[in-house]
Image (cartoon, grey):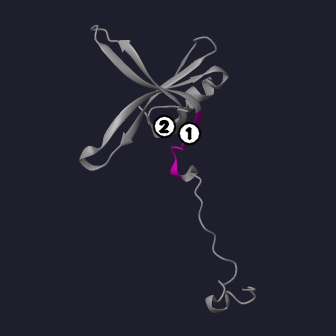
Amino acid sequence: MISHYICTGNLGAPAELKNVGSGLLSFRMGVSTGWGDRKATHWVTCNLWGKRATETLTAILDKGTRVTCSGTLSNREYERQDGTKAYSLELNLDEIDIHPKDASNNTQLTPQAPSSPPPDEDNLLDGVPF
């Protein structure tokens, strides 16, 4: 069975680097779903383990940063301070794509103007053997 989750959202707070084993970078991102009256935001805790959890990413992943993340989704049960049970949606990351904050840095594919005029549609099929 394959379980893979991909989502895009914004960080609700700066990422935290924790020295757990080989390193853990953790952050929460808000993922918007629905539209109109049914619009909602789901909060997903994202975890990046190992060598990829670096200080460099901590500096980049600030509150409001837009990211696209993919990985394995799990639902972790924990106990709140008042003793009640709660659940946390967690994503153990395989990949993370960071979207630039400055719109001028966005890479957009724009069609290029043709260097020659388009072909005459009436003569388009000339030379086709069928």
- The Cα atoms of the two marked residues, 1 and 2, are separated by 8 Å
Viewer-closest of 34 and 53: 34
Identity, as a three-letter code, of the amino acid under mark 1: Ile
Q: Which quadrant holds the C terminus?
A: bottom right
Give the quarter of the image for residue 43: top left
Disc 1 target residue: 98
Indicate the position of residue 12 as horizontal and vertical percent values. Answer: 41, 31
Identify the residue at image location x=31%, y=8%: 81
Furthest residue toward bottom = 122
**Which residue is disc 2 drawn over?**
65
57, above or below 17, in the image? below
Residue 21 horizontal side relative to residue 62, left or right: right
Mark 1 nearby-residue class (10 Å; few <14, some 14–19, many ≥20): some
Determine if the magenta segment contains residue 28. Answer: no
Disc 2 residue type (three-letter): Thr
Residue at left offset 54%, top offset 43%: 99
Q: Is residue 6 above or below residue 123?
A: above
Q: Which mark is residue 74?
A: none
* First reached walking from the N terminus: tag 1 or tag 2: 2
Disc 2 secondary structure class: loop
Q: Is residue 102 magenta?
A: yes
SS category of the residue bearing label 1: strand
